[in-house]
Amino acid sequence: MKNFLKKILEDWKARKRARAEKALDDLRISYHTFRVLLANNDRSLDLLLNIDRLLTSPAPSRTELSEKIEDLLSITYELVDGLNRLTGNRYARLYEKHDALSTAIRQSLRSISIGSSRAAGCIFLEDLTPDDQSMAGGKAASLAILKQAGLPVPDGFVLSANACKEILMAKHLDSFIRERLSGLEADASRKTYTEGDAEDIRKRILQTELPESLSLDIQKALDRLKEGGEICLSVRSSALVEDHPEHTFAGQFKTVLNVNSFESATTALKEVVASNFSVRSTMYRLNAGLPLAEYDMAVLFQRMVPARAAGVLFTVDPTSPESNRMLISAVSGLGSLAVGGDAPADIYRPLRDEPEREAMDSWATIAQKTRRIIALPQGGIAEEDVPAAQKDAPLLSEAEIFALLEYGHAIESLSGLPQDIEWAISSEGKISILQARPARLAHHDRRSVNLSRGKVLLESGVCASPGRCVGKVKVIRNLKDLDALAEDLSGPVVMVLKQSMVDAARWLPDVAGVVVDFGNPADHLSCVAREYSRPMLTGTGKATEALEEGRWIILEADKTRVLEAPERAWAEVVVRQSTRHRKKSRPAAITRSPDPVSARLRQWIEPLNLTDAYGPTFSIVECKSLHDIIRYSHEMAVMAMFSAGDEVLEDASSVLLRLGEDVPFHFHIIDLGGGVVPGCNRKKMTPNDILSTPLLALWKGITTSGLRWNEPAPVAAVSNLFGRSLLDGAGARPVGSQNYAMITRDYLNLNTRLDYHFAMIDAVCGLNSRANYIRFRFKGGGTSAVQRQRRARFIAEVLQSLDFFTDQREDLVTASIVEVCLEVIQDRLTTLGQLLGFSRLMDAAMLNESLPHKVAQAFLAGDYRLESLKDELALSS
């Protein structure tokens, strides 16, 4: 009987050990599934970046695009499958989402048209992106930058160069034009191309009917402009090489003014297109060494200003660049006479800086004005006499001149070059910017001119999304700062983040640009920045230190630098703009992609709709793109790992190792591989048995001298502490449950439940900075809700000061830090270890609103025993 009972006991122990070993093996499998999922997350984001580049390229390889998309479909399926293997098929519906997107993407991929330009159709200035600029021309691109920066540029749209080419492709007009221009380059006398030839080309173009799709685009664009009132437009060229420092094409192409109907707009369009082949512009091309028969012109349609006066502003006086003055010319009425030099103009030469130091009489030369050009009510323009009372009067007041100077400084700071700016002013004194281009300074080195942009504030990082913008610095350290952004959008804002947090993506339509300390061009926020065409500079390492809150800056993402902007000029720009600065994504109803299939592909692949991991819309239902599936799978996998070891403790606690030394904070060690010294089987381990880099860093903090592991709450009375069970978002977490740490050489997942609260840490700490991260959660306490929330505020303040991106909701604190080097991760884990010991029972001390901040400062100063607050804590208790 004794042997029988002994055998039963041995069999029971063997079965128990087998269950324990199986539970550990299952957990190791889950861990490796998780690490593969993390690697696939990085691979999928890299593929998103490559696919975006291909879809925005003017002539991508169909084969390469198909291969990249198939790779992405395969890897995102692995993400979905990995998540479900990790969670026991808890997210099986994600397979259906992935399958539906895969089917739609593959069907579109089979019919995609590769090689056509992306920028066909009408693109409004406020919607023009860097991807479109190569087909919008220099003039439109420059005006788009100014308008999107908040400068007073009249509304308008550009018909891209490829769209204009459709006119020339009709009825073989392009062949006719090439035939007429043939032989001119070899003709030394340059007499083989005559006014007659140019007129023949013009007539052919005017007689050509616009393609139906092009007419529809223009009509839609005009309808959109009419939403702001009756239209009165100027129609002018925006050549791809126009307004370039080497080739300005100034005055070479036709401009049609006061266009007020669809019929007159299409006629004006043809006139401008035909002017590309005038004798004057053709000879300019020939002398500049540019192709003669190549059509490279877009056409700009823009609201006209009912001008009282108009003219030109040079931010550096071209006749005397070293004088430190600007030059303004002004004529009565529309500005045609000013740019053509056909009428007397008032000339003003104020100082660039502090012009009020000199009397206006000393730098103003007032002309006798005789003629002016006006817009006619029925359309078109006319020339008339200037009324006698206005002939000798200054066209501009001193205040209006000073306002123009501020605009000049702002525009110059954006471009980094002296500017030649066309402007107009209404009878109400409202200034409009009609054009801006680099000024040509004869026989002068631009580098010797003192320009408006200031010193370089930051020069580091990589370009995540190209472009240039101006805005006020807004440093974002937590979700509370993000939510407060709504109060700071009275002018252009540049978000400056410590980390590239996807939570910031929801604000990208509203900000001018983004600068990030730690991130990379393939992360979620970078992908969304490219989607919205917001300039973004990432991986700078020190932007939050180098860029002061509220400072005006110029972000040049392409050049990976940030410069100082003229604060007074940009502050004045914001004051004068009556409408709130708010950027919008491009409206698909107006902007026509030459290949709608490409647009659908981007819509199913790139947009990120799941930007708030804590919001009600963070669900499988809202996964509308592959990017959403990537984001959702990653977030849910990380959350699953926070509780992955719970079941193992129930089945395998008897075979787990235990770490505990010097402090009453013990936890089981679950070695997933490489985390402990080989062969170690001691039940009670010491730090010498540990090989896990993140756990050793955490333990260093836990065992810091002076922490209050063995002491009661730091107040005289603790009667308000009570035993309670805690709940987190995933389910019950009873006080007193066993603590455990899952570890490998470079991984740590710690779950602790002690003193009425729980804390969780999930971290990767290795040589690959891009893969490194820490995620931290803290919740609960044994006191009132108010005191628990105060302790949460103290913890959030500490973590924020350590560069964690933090969020506090009641007594729950979540924080993360990503993509930093091994040394930084080790340092932050050590501090978290100290925080675990310091914060226990600390909610009992939070008896007034000032203490969370004071206790945080004491902790950061190393005052773990709160010697600096002894008197206050004694009084409070």
Image (cartoon, rainbow, N blue to C red):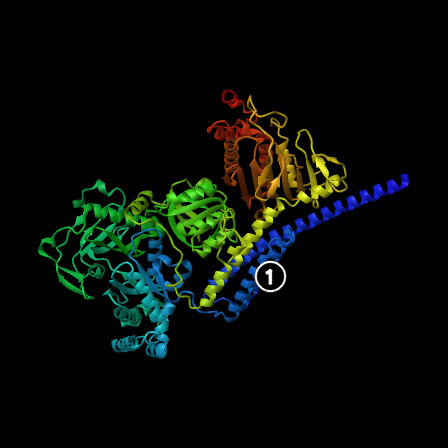
Residue 532, compared with residue 212, is above or below; it is above
> Which amino acid, mark 1?
Ser
- Image coordinates of residue 262 in percent, x first then y, are 27, 69
Q: Quadrant of residue 263?
A: bottom left
Q: Is residue 145 left or right of residue 667?
A: left
Q: Residue furthest left?
A: 388
Q: Quadrant of the N terminus?
A: top right
Q: Quadrant of residue 266?
A: bottom left
Q: Residue at x 55, y 56 (%)?
A: 629
Q: Count the marks: how many?
A: 1
- Image coordinates of residue 302 in percent, x first then y, are 29, 61
Q: Is residue 339 left or right of residue 99?
A: left
Q: Residue at x 65, y 39 (%)?
A: 695
Q: Secondary structure at mark 1?
A: helix
Q: Is residue 200 visible?
A: yes
Q: Residue at x 46, y 40 (%)?
A: 545
In the foreground, 545 or 505? 505
Q: Is residue 513 left or right of residue 385?
A: right
In the foreground, 674 or 592? 592
Q: Which residue is mark 1?
A: 74
Q: Quadrant of residue 142?
A: bottom left
Q: Residues within 10 Å of mark 1 (few under 14, many from 20)?
A: few
- Image coordinates of residue 196 in percent, x first then y, are 25, 78
Q: Residue at x 20, y 66 (%)?
A: 380
Q: Is residue 280 visible?
A: no
Residue 296, compared with residue 411, is above or below; it is below
- Image coordinates of residue 561 in percent, x first then y, are 43, 48
Q: Residue furthest front?
A: 1
